[in-house]
Amino acid sequence: MEKNIDNLEKFILEKGIYDEKENQRIYNKFFKYWKNDHKYIYDRFNIDFSEKILDIGCSYGYNLINFSKESMGIEFCEQTSNFAEGLGLNIASVNIEDDLLDIKKKFDLIWCSDVIVHLISPFKFLYECRSLLKDNGRIVL
């Protein structure tokens, strides 16, 4: 679902579920520079955008929108998950502390940024993530 920067703005403004002003605010704050500003992370971990990636804590979908169509996001906040779903992204509203294993798919990579610090049991979370990975899968925290 990768889009170039010009098409991405148009896409967000057209598909975003809020009014034009709010969609523009979300685009400017979360999408506009995200991929370029985080290129070093993508490069450092050799992120292959064509892989099947699970984006845990995907928020508005600013990473997930760059990943393959087979990828999936998990977001518990209704406001942000509704926005990401409105963009056509595959989103699950799962409590990752209790229900992570309800996801029955396997992924090449789990992308999990700014989540682990909020968990009661990070060890349990990481242990359960292993069951969601394909053989030789990776987790980027």
Image (cartoon, rainbow, N blue to C red):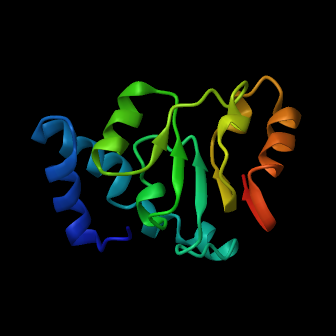
Q: To which quarter of the image does residue 119 belong? A: top right
Residue 111: quadrant of the picture: bottom right
**Picture layout, residue 118 above or below residue 41:** above
Give the image quarter of residue 140.
bottom right
Counting the numbered discs, the total is 0
Reply above or below: 2 against 65.
below
The image quadrant where one finds the N terminus is bottom left
Horizontal arrangement in the rendering, residue 55 relative to residue 140 (left or right)? left
Q: Which residue: 82% across, 43% down?
A: 126
Give the residue displayed 30% in from the left and 74% down from the top: 4
Q: Quick check: 5 above or below 126?
A: below
Give the residue furthest to the front: 104
Point out the residue furthest to the left here: 20
Task: Provide residue 36's location: percent of width, then percent of height.
Answer: 44, 69
- Horizontal side, residue 125 vs residue 27: left or right: right
Which residue is found at the position 11% from the left and 41% from the top? Answer: 20
Image coords of residue 26 (percent x, y): 29, 43
Task: Determine the residue positioned at 59% across, 71% down.
Answer: 51
16 or 45: which is nearer to us?
16
Q: Considering depth in this image, is 41 or 126 the residue closer to the camera? A: 126
x, y percentage for residue 133? 76, 57
